[in-house]
Image (cartoon, grey):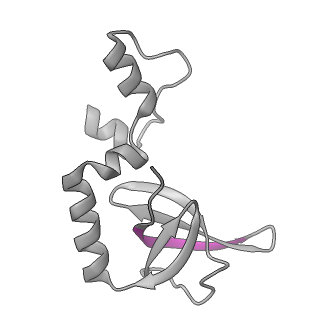
């Protein structure tokens, strides 16, 4: 499933003539293109779909939506550890080379 998920802009940089941001989606940080919403600032919330910020969102709406998605398990489905889940479901060890990066929110939550 592909969702438009609210996230908070943590930092902004110009990369290859494209305005990009690090965006926090309830603990998962991803790179997002800001070209469709060029006036976004650090601390703003945006609705993001397939790596593109589509529109600004107020903080309360973003928090409510993230909470709802979390309660429904949608965030885990969208950003979760798919390799680990597949291995667990199969009763197998996690495949080599699919370890979570040190310090990642997902790895910390599973420790």
On whether residue 11 falls in the magenta region, the answer is yes
Magenta stretch in the rendered image? 6-14
Point out the residue furthest to the top here: 92
Decide which of 2, 47 is in the foreground and name it: 2
Q: Position of residue 22 (x, y in %)?
A: 53, 65
On whether residue 54 falls in the magenta region, the answer is no
Q: How many marks?
A: 0
Residue at the image point whose x is 25% and y is 81% from the top: 60
Q: Position of residue 12 (x, y in %)?
A: 59, 74
Decide which of 5, 7 is in the foreground and name it: 5
Which quadrant of the structure image shows residue 15? Answer: bottom right
Residue at the image point whose x is 28% and y is 65% from the top: 66
Point out the residue furthest to the bottom here: 39
State whether residue 18 is above or below residue 92.
below
Which quadrant of the structure image shows residue 88? Answer: top left
Point out the residue furthest to the right here: 16
């Amino acid at each position: 499933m592909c969702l438009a998920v609210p996230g908070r802009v943590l930092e902004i940089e110009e990369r290859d003539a494209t305005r990009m941001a690090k965006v926090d989606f309830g603990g998962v940080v991803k790179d997002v293109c800001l070209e469709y919403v060029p006036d976004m600032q650090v601390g703003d919330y945006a609705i993001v779909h397939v790596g593109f910020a589509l529109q600004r969102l107020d903080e309360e709406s973003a928090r409510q939506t993230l909470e709802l998605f979390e309660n429904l398990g949608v965030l885990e489905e969208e950003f979760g550890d798919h390799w680990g889940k597949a291995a667990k479901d199969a009763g197998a060890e996690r495949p080599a080379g699919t370890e979570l990066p040190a310090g990642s929110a997902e790895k910390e939550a599973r420790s």
